[in-house]
Image (tube, helix red, strand yellow):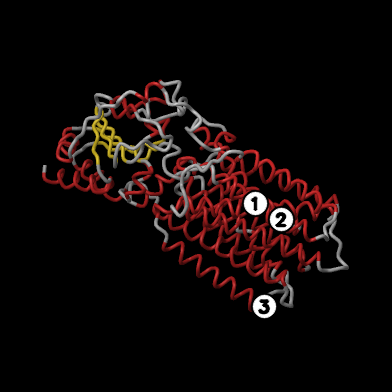
Amino acid sequence: MNPENLIVLLYVLVLASFVGFELIAKIPPTLHTPLMSGSNAISGITIVGAIVASGPDVWSTSKVLGIAALFLATLNVVGGYAVTDRMLQMFKKKK
Amino acid sequence: MNQDIIIKIAYLVASVLFIVGIKMLGKTTTARKGNTLSSAAMLIAVLITLLDKNVLSYTEIFVTILIGSAVGLYIAQKVEMTQMPEMVALLNGFGGASSVLVATSEYWKLAHDSAATMDPIAAITTALSVIIGSVTFTGSMVAFGKLKGLINGGSVTFKGQHLLNALFLAAIIILSAMMVSSPNTEVWMFSLLFLSLVLGVLVVIPIGGADMPVVISLLNSYSGIAACATGFILNNQVLIIAGALVGTSGIILTQIMCKAMNRSLANVLLGGFGQTVGTSSKSEQEIVTKEVGVEETAMLFDSASSVIIVPGYGMAVAQAQHVVRELTDLLEKRNISVKFAIHPVAGRMPGHMNVLLAEANIPYDKLIEMDDINDEFANTDIALIIGANDVVNPAARNNPQSPIYGMPILNADKARTVIVSKRSMNAGYAGIENELFGFPNCLMLFGDAKSSMSKVVSELKEL
């Protein structure tokens, strides 16, 4: 990786962090548990990395590690989103 | 347009959807939609990666995703709402493990290809990803074990603990430097992996009980940072953006939790709450409590006109949220106003009580935050405390020697009558006596919260 590319990525990181701080500071405590499980599911974005890592054609140690990563990341993503949805479904206003 | 541009645009769309999704999570009315948007973003990112890497033909990838999804859906449907902290800890750990495995896989690929050389930037990001991912993984597993009661849920401290942790950290820094200077020597990489895994265990074992919300928030943040580091390895912006959102979310929650306990993050991380502080003179006085039976409790409720319920972790343990809802309905039928006072650290994770009460169909506009309800206690007939202890301990206000002095608390003691549903006289997590229980306006209703409450409900029905 060349340094210019690294700088671009750092820009992305810093700006995204600012957006994150702005948005999340406004979330009310009622929604903190769904926020946690939902953001947990988002951190499963490593699934993208896992797909890349499990890509090579031949079976190798590298690929086995990639497949294991893919399994755990999928679990994290699907489990996280599903449980968050289940929780949010329960938040109701007085009828 | 060539494929490369399409892929980049798809990643951009995914990033935007993640951000909008998080924004919508901020309002109860739009939260569910926000979660759906964010999962759509994930789907786009996954599909486009499958296309990009031309891996559509690999059955093993599909089988893995299918099995992973099935297991994930199954767990998400089965899990009890009281077990949400464990669930979050477990999934967090999986996220961390996945980051480590991706980093290790990439490292292996490079180290075994004599033609490839690893530049310092790649080596640094790999080292970071391995360290943060490992600590997230083992740390979350320990947190999971503690919450589930598989291992000692309290604070485990031993002599020289901080020194040992410091040594580990120093060794990890040295190993990272070695790895960056000679990336092809595998021994550095694997020693780094091993030490980081052990460090994850060491940093979480001294933290226990009511400090769990802090540690879960912090690990949540780590899992995001780990995803970020992986994004740097793979030169992938969507990983960095999504990881940054999760990272900041965890950090903000950690700050909120620390503030609600009037403790610094360092203080929580070093563990051992209440052990360093000598017993205060006040707590040595014998506290004389007044007991109350279920019939009398029911009569008290019957003659009240306003009630505030203060739930705590004990309500979750006893699974009493549904019977509390029944009680609420009964009281409201008699035109008694019922509100819930939620302390930010009640339960074992941020927002734990809100989820439990939502599960029991209690409308969220009845759940009121500490700062908004604290002045109302003085005009309230009954404060009913279910399984909460330290968050209503007046010592936090008026006893400078108390270890929890300065912690913001719910002013439940100011209500005309305080009824405490509690299993026994055991102290709370902080290990200190609660002088509230000896107050003249305080009545103790001993017994399991669920059975006490259901008895009160049936008594009320007969009145």
Residue A88 visible to an observer of this rendering: no
Q: Secondary structure at mark 3?
A: loop
Q: Which residue is mark 1?
A: B243
Which residue is rendered at x = 36% and y = 38% of the image? B388
Q: Nearer the viewer, residue B150 or B255?
A: B150
Q: Quadrant of residue B290?
A: top left
Drawn side of residue B63 relative to residue B338, left or right = right
Q: Chain of mark 2?
A: B
- Residue farthest to the front, as pictured: B159
Q: What amino acid is found at the position of numbered circle 1 in the picture?
A: Gly
Q: Which mark is residue B58?
A: 3
Q: How many angstroms separate mark 1 from mark 3 (CA)? A: 27 Å
Drawn side of residue B96 relative to residue B306, left or right = right
Q: Earlier in the sequence, mark 1 or mark 3?
A: 3
Q: Are marks 2 and 1 on the same chain?
A: yes
Q: Which mark is residue B231?
A: 2
Q: Position of residue B122 (x, y in %)?
A: 80, 55
Verify CB contact (< 8 Å) between mark 2 and mark 1.
Answer: yes
Q: Secondary structure at mark 1?
A: helix
Q: What amino acid is found at the position of numbered circle 3 in the picture?
A: Tyr
Q: Which mark is residue B411?
A: none
Q: Nearer the viewer, residue A38 or B230?
A: B230
